[in-house]
Image (spheres, rainbow, N blue to C red):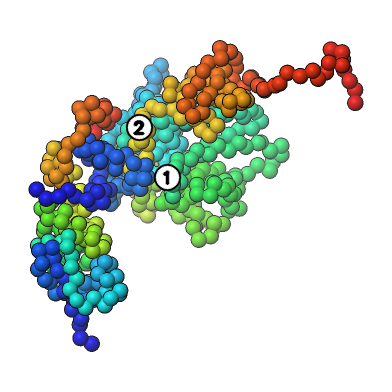
Amino acid sequence: MSSHIPLQIELEILKRLPIKPLIRFILVCKAWKSLIKCSEFIAGYSVPQTQPHQHLVIKYQVGGRGEEVPEVKYVSYVDDDTSPQQKSALTVPSLVQGTTLLDSSHGLLCMLNSFDDLSNTQMPVLWNPAIRKAIGVVIPTVVLWPFHSVVGFGVCPHTKDPKLVKTVIGRTEREEEDHNQIMSFDLITDEFREVDIPERLLQAYISISGLRDSLVLLEYDTSFPSEKQVCRVWMMEHADRKAFRKLFTIKPPDASVASTLGFRKSGEPIIELEDDTDIGFKSAPVVYEPCYRHIKDIGICGPTHSFFLSSYMESLLLLDHDDGHIVGSRGVKCMDDGSSVSGTLTFRKSGESIVEIQEDVMDPICDLAVYEPCLEKIKDLEIRGNRDSFHGSSYLESLLLLDHDDGRIITC
Amino acid sequence: MSKKTLTLMSKDKQLFNIEEHLAVQSVTIRNMVKEDGASSVIPLPRVDSETLALVIEYLNRQQAPEEDEDYVKKFVDERGEIPTLLELAQAALDLDIKKLMDAACMKVADLIKDFTLEEVREALRIENDRTPEEEKAIRDEFQWAF
């Protein structure tokens, strides 16, 4: 028997394996476990080009007519050169239930739950369907009317750090000046930037989408002679950020476009058609072929506007996290038992801090505790109250004010 | 201009001649040639003669650049034995011939992807150092993959 294979060759082989065998091979030996679960390997891994690597995920509902509670399903298609028929149902982790699909980036789907008024928090869920893991991220929400907030998601292409961006927007007083506005956020430099929208689209009914790394504007229009809704697709030209070029108009024969869900890698849009005979209840996403105006069914149907679509590439992100784990965003630190430090009041002389501990991120009741930062230990102070209602300070005893009457009011 | 020839020596002291302009596809050899002209024999103490013969065959290929990708793939496909491919990958890594290393590792990955854990350990001569408890923890975490 000859000598062992060098680690470097093993690493080169592992890099070229599809995800499923890679996960199985964690069990080959201790060295392989360390190699595969190392954060650099996780960040650098991309599915070999020989494997199906581009996917479309669609969220949809079945049932729900009348009293029936609709069932939410996720289905994933391989997005290659063939028609998207090769589909597989995704196993939905418990954290993902009851959320809507916001966006995807580097193999992670970002899911949003509805805003919880009571605790003033929101917990987006990051889900990697390829390795079946999901984690929750608590983001504090201290936004009240007349402001509203928008959450965006992306993975930094360099560091592979997932980033959630919450933008708080104030409403303008002068409603007549309202027009479409698009802000972009650079995941590398963390900078915001306003995207210039062509004049004719400022007042149009638009939504945004993405096609091959470019921003796409979808302009919906019912003023078309046939009174059927059509959708014009505008793509941002990379060379000049000001220019949007009209790619084509989605104008299926004898049908209205309810919405454009997204695009295949090939550029073909996947659209929802309005069913004239059963308006608002049933619709089926189809692939639209813009040159010949052909439509192709993809084998699912559900209530109109209940579909969400995103394309994603398989990745290993979250492999080093436990499924179902809830993490705090900056300023919110989670303890081992699932409780989280929601705020720091003050510090003890020893350097330990006095913190608010929240048992359940959705429950506004907090306990006060001493937090020992090195060992990450907490000691309960047996005081309980509403979150953010605590204030603390340290003081030394002194004789100051001894020469003043209690309750006296001094004017200056 | 006459074509300069280099002599490479394998681990088991066999000598192989190759034209210099072909040999310098290996970044390692290119650097040696640049440094001291490499007029004498270049020793490759980690590469056996069978593997070196394969490397020489690869370097001597007469392929149009656009067909090169297909050629490398076919080249490793025809030598589909894992031990041979591992030796080849090792030699390509030492000699810094990226395309050959990529193709050899890709082929190995392709061959082992459906192997059982025991088959992988056997093929790559890896010792199982996992405890049953660790094994159970991983199997529980990734039930779907097993």
Give the class, few, some or many, for how many residues have Cα within 10 Å of label 2's Cα (few <14, many ≥20). Answer: many
Q: Tell me the element at label 1.
A: loop
**Residue annotated with mark 1:** A160
Q: Residue at x 67, y 23 (%)?
A: A393
Q: Which corner quadrant holds the C terminus of chain A?
A: top right
Query: Disc 2: which chain?
Result: A
Judge from the rendering whether residue A337 lies leftward or rightward of residue A315; answer left or right: right
Q: On the image, which quarter does residue A23 sit in?
A: top left
Residue found at the very far bottom of the displayed protein: B1
Query: Amino acid under label 2?
Result: Lys
Nearest to viewer (mark 1 / mark 2): 1
Judge from the rendering whether residue A14 lies leftward or rightward of residue B45; answer left or right: right
Q: Residue at x 19, y 44 (%)?
A: B113
As measured in the structure, the alpha-carbon distance from the residue carrying label 1 to the one carrying label 2 is 17 Å
Percent position of residue B69, x then y? 23, 63
Judge from the rendering whether residue A287 lies leftward or rightward of residue B16; answer left or right: right
Query: Amino acid under label 1?
Result: Lys
Q: Residue at x 11, y 50 (%)?
A: A2
**Residue annotated with mark 2:** A133
| Closer-to-camera residue (A315/A183) | A315
Look at the image and tell me whether residue B121 can be seen. Answer: yes
| Closer-to-camera residue (B16/A274) | B16
Q: Residue at x 26, y 63 (%)?
A: B96
Percent position of residue A171, x then y? 66, 36
| Closer-to-camera residue (B87/B112) | B87
Look at the image and tell me whether residue A297 can be seen. Answer: no
